[in-house]
Image (spheres, grey):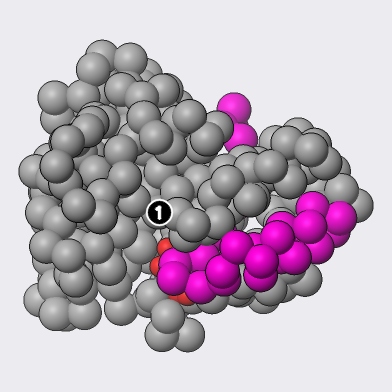
């Protein structure tokens, strides 16, 4: 498979800028020894207040880490107190922006339409939108997983520019697996990723769909990474809790390097 793996750490609302500085320095040193494959890319998504600090260290020390953000506004500028625009993030050399994480959907009323508009803003600003999708516990027990994924993916990518596939990553994060210690099985992750790729193909075309990376997220740990990455349609992982410790996150990267030598 030509798609390189993406190992992304979502720090959520953890680490102030001083803690971020220590974490990214530590991570950088460890990655210099561990990240021996050109087929594995590492990204971190710190809180907004840490971005400048992390970007400065990554640039000064030439660390093999891409910068990510966790969210942004769908609008470019104006009287929107508390919001941050995609162009502001792009100016800080941010490469990836999570769009529609389930916590934003559930706690901050981000609906499918807003996800689409935000993905569009991210791509328009020259960054990569990491669109997060996934079913809830109830939807899963009602057998609605594929239906939910079809709806979320179709809504997010419909109307994106023709060449948007280059700047799109989809993260499958089943809500029941997030922070629960109960990761999806490799079969479930692969099944969902295959379905997502088929939906992407129906909207953007087969050739484009083949180039888009699909990540799995939800209780990823060093011990389950290799298995989760074994599915041919699973191109990386989006890691929450286990990305807050440099040693643990590096073990996840090491597992990815074994899968993508
Ligand atoms: P955990 O890895 O802590 O389950 O979080 C997953 C997640 O939400 C990443 O975006």
Report the residue at 39% width, 35% height from top: 88
Residue 208 part of the magenta-drawn span:
no
Q: Is residue 179 above or below residue 46?
A: below
The answer to which image quadrant residue 2 occupies is top right
Quarter containing the N terminus: top right
* Image x and y of residue 207, in percent: 37, 19
Residue 24 part of the magenta-drawn span:
yes
Q: Quadrant of ligand 1?
A: bottom left
**Horizontally, is 238 left or right of 71 in the view?**
right
Say if residue 237 shows up in the picture.
no
Say if residue 158 shows up in the picture.
yes
Q: Is residue 143 above or below residue 128?
A: below
**Horizontally, is 84 left or right of 79 in the view?**
right
* Image x and y of residue 231, in percent: 52, 53
Q: Is residue 134 above or below residue 130?
A: below
* Image x and y of residue 31, in percent: 81, 52
Disc 1 secondary structure class: loop
Question: Which residue is disc 1 drawn over?
Answer: 70
- In magenta, the rendered stretch is 1-30
Report the residue at 38% width, 76% height from top: 177
Report the residue at 42% width, 80% height from top: 179
Q: Circle 1: is it few (<14), some (14-19), or many (20+) Cα within 10 Å?
A: many
The answer to which image quadrant residue 229 occupies is bottom right
Report the residue at 35% width, 56% height from top: 172
Which of the pair 239/66 is nearer the observer? Answer: 66
* Image x and y of residue 115, in percent: 19, 45
Quarter containing the C terminus: top right
């Amino acid at each position: 498979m030509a798609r390189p793996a993406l190992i992304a750490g979502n720090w959520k609302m953890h680490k102030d800028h001083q803690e971020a500085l220590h974490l990214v320095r530590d991570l950088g040193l460890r990655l210099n020894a561990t990240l021996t494959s050109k087929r594995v890319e590492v990204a971190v998504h710190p809180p907004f207040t840490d971005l400048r600090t992390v970007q400065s260290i990554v640039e000064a020390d030439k660390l093999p880490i891409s910068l990510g953000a966790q969210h942004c506004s769908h609008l470019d500028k104006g009287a929107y107190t508390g919001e941050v625009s995609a162009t502001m993030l792009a100016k800080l050399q941010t490469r990836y922006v999570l769009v529609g994480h389930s916590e934003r959907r559930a706690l901050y009323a981000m609906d499918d339409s807003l996800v689409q508009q935000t993905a569009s803003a991210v791509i328009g600003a020259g960054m990569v939108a990491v669109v997060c999708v996934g079913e809830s516990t109830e939807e899963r027990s009602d057998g609605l997983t594929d239906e939910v994924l079809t709806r979320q993916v179709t809504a997010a990518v419909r109307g994106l520019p023709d060449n948007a596939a280059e700047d799109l990553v989809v993260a499958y994060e089943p809500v029941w697996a997030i922070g629960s210690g109960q990761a999806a099985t490799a079969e479930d992750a692969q099944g969902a990723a295959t379905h997502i790729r088929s939906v992407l193909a129906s909207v953007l075309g087969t050739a484009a769909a083949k180039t888009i990376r699909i990540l799995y997220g939800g209780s990823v740990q060093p011990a389950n990474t290799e298995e989760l990455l074994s599915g041919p349609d699973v191109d990386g992982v989006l890691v929450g809790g286990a990305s807050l410790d440099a040693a643990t996150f590096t073990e996840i990267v090491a597992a990815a390097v074994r899968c993508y030598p």
